Image: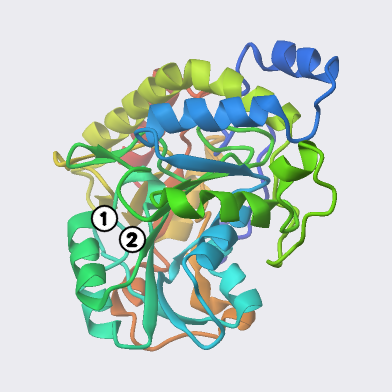
Amino acid sequence: MKTTQNDLPIMEVGNENIVLFHPHIAKNATKYVSETLETRWIGQGPKVERFEKEFSEKFCRGLNTVAVGSGTDALHLAYILAGLQPGDEVIAPVFTCTATNIPFLYMGVKIVFADVQKNTLNIDVEHVKELVNEKTKAIVCVHYGGLPCDMDEIHQVAKEWGIPVIEDAAHAPGSSYRGTPVGAISEFTMFSFQAIKHITTGDGGMLSIKDKSILAKAERIRWFGIDRCAKQQGNWENDIKEIGYKYQMTDIAAAIGLAALEEFDEISSHRRKLFEIYEQNLSDVDGLHFIGGGYTDRVHAAWLCTIIAEKRIDLQHKLREFNIESNQVHYRNDRYTILGGRRNNLPNMDAIEDKYLVLPLHTKLTEENVYHVCEVIKSGW
């Protein structure tokens, strides 16, 4: 029986179920992890350094990179390196994983939520222009679903006010904006290797940093504030001058990541093909708007396939009847008590918050699966 509530539990794998997410574990991951377990280094060691280098070369045009234990770690590290202090204001998207904004609560930074664009669910630059002021110390943007934000416009605002841009690219490895890869555009860019991302290390993250002069500081903060290189070279009396965290990646995780890098082009090609099939089949369906399609000046990373649907709950139940899992995945952050409660200046978010729906997209999914999902949707709900 249909309800007005999103009351559907997580769907199990099997029984011809088409699940929403599924991790991709590269074929060499087990081998590389096993080899790592036979070495001296299972914590942060040479494989972490190698992973940083290879990731940077592939996605960040050789910028400095720091591998950490999660995407959230990378964001917190970026906010610290950006010099944010208690009482500062930051403009951030209201529609994102809470990981984007929770570090600000620890730092005493005031979050000023910006609205979404209806056609992308990315941050609305026009709203950013209204919100920015002399108290604003950074702009944070999230490439929702893998579609890059309007980076030229965002950087123009940031340049006018002399503040950094911090990109949350958890959804967007392999994407690019006007010919420049995401990861090489802004002062700081975070990537996530959480279980169901394009690349997984079980959990993990990477931060790309444009300013090479703060790389050593980033590496110290990642490891309690300790100069780890000096310590390993025999200087056991080195001082700690910065409050650090235990944010490092392990060689075990890096081994999984290195295996994933070998397959990334294949992973990306498959996901983009599935996204393309969705776009071709769902762009003209009555009562539905396809999110993130039709752009020629940027490359979509195809992590999420999202639609705006009238009677979304009815559609979810219709899909579940055909063993197809769907859900909202992210929520407007101002609905959470810890983030201050609902704002009244976000009309685009208000208009779509009960209408967006994420469809299955992962490497276990076949083209035939996607055509089937599209046919179920096109049959009506």
Towards the viewer: 375 or 364: 364
Above or below residue 141? Residue 13 is above
Instruction: Point out the image quarter for the N terminus.
Output: bottom right
Disc 2 vs disc 1: Cβ atoms closer than 8 Å? yes
Distance, label 2 to label 1, CA atoms, is: 5 Å
Of callouts 2 and 1, the N-terminal one: 1
Towards the viewer: 47 or 197: 47
Residue at the image position 25 percent from the left and 33 percent from the top: 281
- Please say whether residue 186 is visible from this viewpoint: yes
Which quadrant of the figure has residue 119? bottom left
Residue at the image position 38 percent from the left and 89 percent from the top: 344
Residue at the image position 31 percent from the left and 34 percent from the top: 278
Q: Which residue is denoted by mark 1 in the rendering?
A: 287
Q: Residue 100: where, in percent of width, then height? A: 52, 63
Q: Residue 120: where, in percent of width, then height? A: 28, 55
**Which class describes the residues within 10 Å of circle 1: few (<14), some (14-19), or many (20+)?**
few
Which quadrant of the figure has residue 355? bottom left
- Please say whether residue 371 is visible from this viewpoint: no
Q: Residue 25: where, in percent of width, then height? A: 63, 22
Callout 1: SS: loop
In the shown orientation, is residue 330 left or right of residue 135?
right
Q: Which residue is denoted by mark 2 in the rendering?
A: 310
Which quadrant of the figure has residue 44? top right
Callout 2: SS: loop
In the shown orientation, is residue 358 left or right of residue 339?
left
The amino acid on which the numbered mark 2 sits, given as a three-letter code, is Glu
Towards the viewer: 170 or 280: 170
Residue at the image position 62 percent from the left and 82 percent from the top: 337
The amino acid on which the numbered mark 1 sits, given as a three-letter code, is Gly
Above or below residue 253? Residue 231 is below
In this picture the colour scheme is rainbow
In the shown orientation, is residue 52 left or right of residue 240?
left
